[in-house]
């Protein structure tokens, strides 16, 4: 951590629905113990959950491609001055990189009002969506993270030389 930064929570390892539930409750307890204001704590909590589910929906196993293998990744939460930062890292297949990069770039370019409108429209259309969108999930996860953010989401896709055909996706968001 850099000067002035305080690590609040860190998880690295297998990511499954039950692990997301357990780690999210641990984060909630940590935020309560630090007396983080309720509206801000809700944004941090929901962004954490959505970043974790992003790992499940888009992540690739570190081992042999097998849907029974849970996805692996990490999520860090830290405070710097009056801002809270969340960063997730996970492996994704090279074939999923382009749609994810396009979606994240699109979200970066939207105003807060456009994010709210898109969120409402997506919620309204949920009953008409197939089980998954073109990049997995219902399309609300990254939109939720972007809505909660005080500034545009930052992301990077980097080569993962030890994992042929996979890239490391890193997403960083700031909540105030």
Image (cartoon, helix red, strand yellow):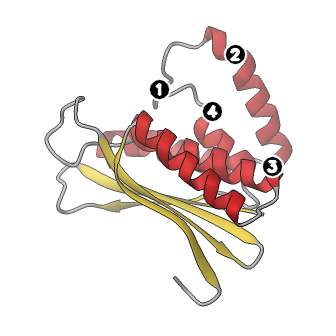
- In the picture, measured across the screen, residue 92 lies left or right of residue 8, that is left
Q: CA distance from mark 3 to mark 4?
A: 16 Å
Residue at the image position 13 percent from the left and 41 percent from the top? 64
Q: Which residue is mark 1?
A: 134
| Label 3 crowd bin: few (<14), some (14–19), many (20+), radius 10 Å | some
Which of labels 2 and 3 is toward the front? 2
Where does the image place residue 82, in percent across and percent down from the top left? 78, 74
> Sequence-wise, which precedes: disc 2 or disc 3?
3
If the image is split into quadrants, where does the C terminus sit?
A: bottom right
Q: Marks 2 and 3: CB-CB under 8 Å?
A: no
SS for callout 2: helix
| Residue 117 in view (yes/no) | yes
SS for callout 3: loop
Q: Which residue is mark 4?
A: 140
SS for callout 1: loop
Residue 34 figure quarter: bottom right
Q: CA distance from mark 1 to mark 4?
A: 13 Å
> Sequence-wise, which precedes: disc 2 or disc 1?
2
Residue 59 figure quarter: top left
Q: Which residue is mark 2?
A: 125
Residue that extends furthest to the right in the rendered view of this protein: 113
The residue closer to the viewer here, 113 or 39, is 39
Q: Which residue is mark 3?
A: 111
Q: CA distance from mark 3 to mark 1?
A: 23 Å
- In the picture, measured across the screen, residue 80 lies left or right of residue 13, that is right
Residue at the image position 71 percent from the left and 57 percent from the top? 32
Residue at the image position 17 percent from the left and 61 percent from the top? 162
Residue at the image position 55 percent from the left and 86 percent from the top? 2
Where does the image place residue 146, in percent across and percent down from the top left? 68, 48
């Amino acid at each position: 951590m850099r000067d002035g930064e305080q690590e609040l929570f860190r998880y690295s390892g297998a990511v499954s629905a039950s692990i997301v539930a357990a780690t999210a409750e641990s984060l909630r307890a940590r935020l309560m113990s630090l007396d983080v204001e309720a509206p801000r704590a809700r944004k941090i909590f929901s962004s954490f959950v959505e970043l974790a589910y992003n790992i499940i929906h888009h992540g690739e196993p570190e081992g042999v491609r097998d849907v029974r293998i849970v996805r692996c990744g990490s999520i860090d939460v830290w405070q710097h001055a009056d801002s809270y930062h969340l960063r997730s890292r996970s492996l994704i297949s090279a074939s999923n990189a382009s749609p994810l990069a396009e979606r994240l770039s699109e979200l970066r370019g939207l105003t807060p009002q456009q994010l709210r409108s898109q969120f409402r429209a997506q919620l309204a259309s949920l009953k008409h969506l197939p089980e998954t969108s073109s990049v997995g999930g219902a399309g609300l996860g990254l939109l939720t993270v972007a809505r909660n953010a005080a500034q545009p989401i930052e992301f990077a896709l980097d080569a993962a030389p030890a994992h042929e055909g996979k890239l490391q996706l890193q997403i960083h968001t700031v909540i105030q």
